[in-house]
Amino acid sequence: MKSLAYLASCCFLAVASYAQETTALPIIVAGATQSSIPVGALNLKVEVNDKPVVVASLTSLSGKPLQYVLINDQRLHNQWPGGRDQQANVAKELLKYVVSSGSDIGTLVNYSDEVFLDVQDERDPKKLSSQIRATGIGPARLYEAVVVATKWLAKQPTARDGRKVIFLVCDGSDTGSHVGLADAIKALQEASFPIFVVAPSNSEKKETGGYMRELAEQSGGRAYFFGSSTRYLTFDDLKRDLADSFLLALNPPFPDKGFLPLRITGLAHPQLSISSSTRIFVP
């Protein structure tokens, strides 16, 4: 078990580069895998800081190997209806049904009152699953776990044909982080990683559920809320969103530099919708 607390101050490359003269970010085009519309006919309009940017390409990420971090709440006491056993089961089932053994590369980050790197760069999801257990006490450092895990993943060399994503299984509670929701969102947006959050449905209408939805959606990911019965999980919605993901490459020159608002519009097909980060870092 290796603590990640020291990584909070590390710097990292904040946005992926696609070829030498483009900047790229992942987006979700919901319904794309069920549609007969060619990818090239989507007619995207992209604006960075309210100024148009040329789209170089839009490439499907469906089937690409995952280079992922699973962030897991390992506290003994949480807000899942079935308690610690249900929360741990959801995290293990995610590894079973979403991750492909042998091709996907995973790292497990557990958190409670501290943040720990418990398994690193592992192709066998069963080894991550074996380290998912409820042992922690004290406050929940959820946002801190997101920040340090994101920075850690950003520092890792990108695997060939791989795509970096983060999964978070939690109840949405944060009671001890030294950073806030805005810091977690900024870290994800700078790294250009989507986060996919799995939380209990009893938090969906609460403030914590709203925070988890904001965390996911502002990074270009999704939040999923599961009911009290999680015996038969398939994660169909999550797998569909991964299949509907694309790499959007943008041509320079960019009108401005720094941490800028991003807007993607102009989709001419009402049966499809776009999810993306709300901001982009332009070095």
Image (spheres, helix red, strand yellow):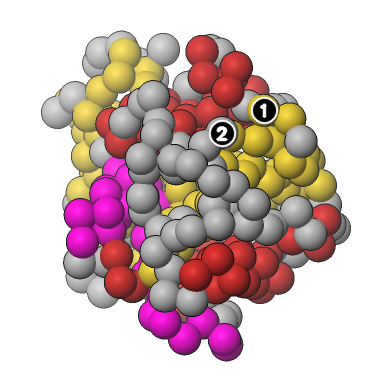
Q: Nearer the viewer, residue 84 or 50?
A: 84
The stretch in magenta equals 206-232
In the figure, 183 relative to 245: above or below?
Answer: above
Q: Which label belongs to residue 3?
A: 1
Residue annotated with mark 2 = 114
Secondary structure under badge 1? Answer: strand
* Tag count: 2
> What type is the residue that disc 2 sits on?
Glu
Residue name at image x 75 percent, y 54 percent: 131
How far from the left and from the top, in percent, is residue 56? 43, 36
How far from the left and from the top, in percent, is residue 81? 42, 75
Q: Is residue 125 visible to us here?
A: no
Q: Which label belongs to residue 281?
A: none
Residue name at image x 44 percent, y 40 percent: 139
Label 1 crowd (10 A; few <14 / some 14-19 / many >=20)? some
Residue name at image x 20 percent, y 54 percent: 207
Residue 63 on the magenta segment: no
Q: Nearer the viewer, residue 238 or 77?
A: 77
Residue 228 on the magenta segment: yes
